[in-house]
Structures are given as C-alpha cells and as structure tokens.
C-alpha cells in the first residue's frame, strides 16, 4: 500500500510519492535538485504568504526561470492569522502565481489561514488551473467545503489537525467528496520528535479513515487515484 503525501517540505525521509513544496526563491533550486534525484518527488515552487514581505525584488523573474522544471506551484496562499500580515501584498503575489499555474494548467498547493472569504472572492473572479486547485491543511468550515468544491478544489489534511479534541477539521474531513480528498504531512514543522515522518503520515490516513468509516486500505486507494488525477495527469 502506497501512502501518497500531497504536501510536504524538504526533510530527511522521503520514500513515498510526495509533493515537495518550496516557500521562497532560496529553496526552489534545492526542491528541483531533490526531484531530479528521486523520481517519486513532485517538485513545487512558490512564494509562501509568510515570505511575501521579505521576498527579493526579482522573485518573479526567478520563478519564471525555474517554473519549467517544476511540476506544481506551491506553496502559495493567503494568511490573516500571522502577525504583521499585509493582505494586499499577499493577494498580489498569490494572484500572479495562480495566473502562472492557470496558464500552464499546473497543480497548485494553497495555504489559507483565516482568509477563506478573500480566497473565495479571488477564485470566483480569476482564472485558475483547469484541473482545479488544492487547499492544503484545509482549515475552513464544513460549509465552505461546498463552495470550494464547486470551484474545483481538492482538500488535504494532516494528523496534527485531527487530534481527538479537534472539531472543525474532522467535520470538514467528513464533508469532502471522496473524489476530492487527499492526505498530507506538511512535514517537517508539523512533526514532534517522538514520531517519525512515516508514522505521522500513516496516522493522518488512520484518522481520516476512522472519520469517514473506511479501512485505511480503501482510503489509500481513493487518495492514490485523486493524487494521480490531480498531480500526475497531463
Ligand atoms: Zn506547507
């Protein structure tokens, strides 16, 4: 059984199929190099909303130089949770990168924290990749799952969002259509040292399987099909 990881960052153990996301121009070359070394890595480059204020002036030129080698755009997005956020600057960077992905029909991995409404506004008015979009570590409500699904969204969750006392993410997990569901690790920052990467990813599959009343095997088959359709189809 293969466990597909829809959103991860560079870290030590990468054996399974994984989308490896960059966050700023400084790590894009490393992502592309790792993907050259390991065929199961899908390289994504993007300017993360937390990096927008500190990005070098020529980040778009770097992006355009390297995008041909990447297989996805990410991690990009909007975040009104972080201190000092400047939504307008985030939106400008996000919309430009979304447009680049749309022009190439590339998968796009989106971070959205406390910004569902501005994100929905953008998705309703701007062109997005024909294959749809991917909302990583989805933190919106179960109701908003419907709005995002209508706009072509796939949704992924990691074990850290699904601890036994959590309420919002589990409700969202149950609301996602089975052909739009993905699992991720968002490693390494999500993982505490007592747990390995493989255990953490597997734990995410176990929790989502429990919440949806499925065996891990059945869930893994669904997720593998969704992952292939979204990230691997031309
Ligand atoms: Zn991430």
Image: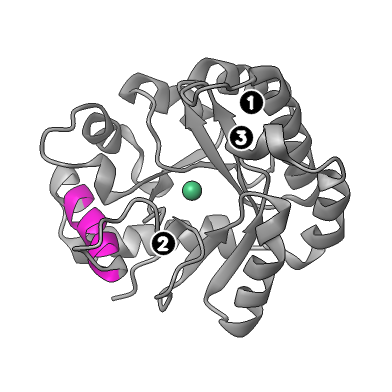
Secondary structure under badge 3? Answer: helix
Q: Label 3 vs label 2: CA separation?
A: 22 Å
Quarter of the view holding residue 151 = top right
> Does residue 81 lie above or below 127 as drawn?
above
User: Where's residue 193, x and y in %?
Assistant: 25, 62
User: Where's residue 93, x and y in %?
Assistant: 74, 33
Query: Where does label 3 land, which residue?
Result: 49
> Does residue 211 lie above or below 42 as drawn?
above
Secondary structure under badge 2? Answer: strand
The magenta segment is 198-208
Of callouts 2 and 1, the N-terminal one = 2
Q: Label 2 vs label 1: CA separation?
A: 25 Å
User: Where's residue 125, x and y in %?
Assistant: 71, 20
Query: Where does label 1 land, which residue?
Result: 123
* Left or right of 50, for residue 61: right
* Discs 2/1, front: 2
Question: Is residue 127 shown to the viewer in this render?
Answer: no
Q: Nearer the viewer, residue 12 or 121?
A: 12
For image coordinates 32% across by 64% down, the residue present is 221
Q: Nearer the viewer, residue 208 or 194?
A: 194
> Does residue 38 lie above or below 128 as drawn?
below
- 10 Å neighbourhood of mark 3: few (<14), some, or many (≥20)? many
Q: Label 3 vs label 1: CA separation?
A: 17 Å
> Does residue 34 lie above or below 204 as drawn?
below
* Left or right of 75, for residue 186: left
């Amino acid at each position: 059984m293969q466990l597909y990881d829809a959103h991860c960052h560079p870290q030590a153990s990468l054996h399974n199929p994984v989308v490896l996301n960059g966050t700023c121009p400084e790590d894009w070359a490393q992502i592309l190099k790792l993907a050259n070394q390991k065929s199961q890595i899908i390289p994504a480059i993007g300017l993360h909303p937390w990096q927008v204020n500190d990005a070098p002036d020529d980040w778009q030129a770097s992006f355009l130089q390297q995008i041909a080698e990447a297989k996805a755009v990410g991690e990009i997005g909007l975040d009104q949770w972080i201190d000092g956020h400047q939504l307008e600057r985030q939106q400008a960077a996000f919309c430009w990168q979304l447009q680049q992905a749309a022009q190439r029909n590339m998968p796009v991995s989106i971070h959205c924290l406390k910004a569902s409404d501005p994100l929905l506004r953008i998705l309703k008015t701007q062109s997005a990749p024909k294959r749809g979009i991917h909302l990583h570590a989805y933190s919106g409500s179960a109701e908003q799952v419907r709005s995002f699904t209508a706009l072509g969204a796939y949704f992924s969750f990691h074990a850290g969002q699904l601890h036994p006392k959590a309420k919002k993410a589990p409700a969202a997990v149950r609301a996602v259509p089975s052909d739009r569901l993905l699992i991720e690790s968002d490693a390494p920052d999500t993982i505490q040292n007592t747990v390995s990467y493989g255990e953490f990813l597997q734990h995410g599959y176990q929790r989502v399987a429990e919440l949806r009343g499925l065996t891990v095997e059945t869930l893994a088959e669904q997720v593998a099909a969704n992952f292939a359709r979204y990230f691997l189809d031309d």
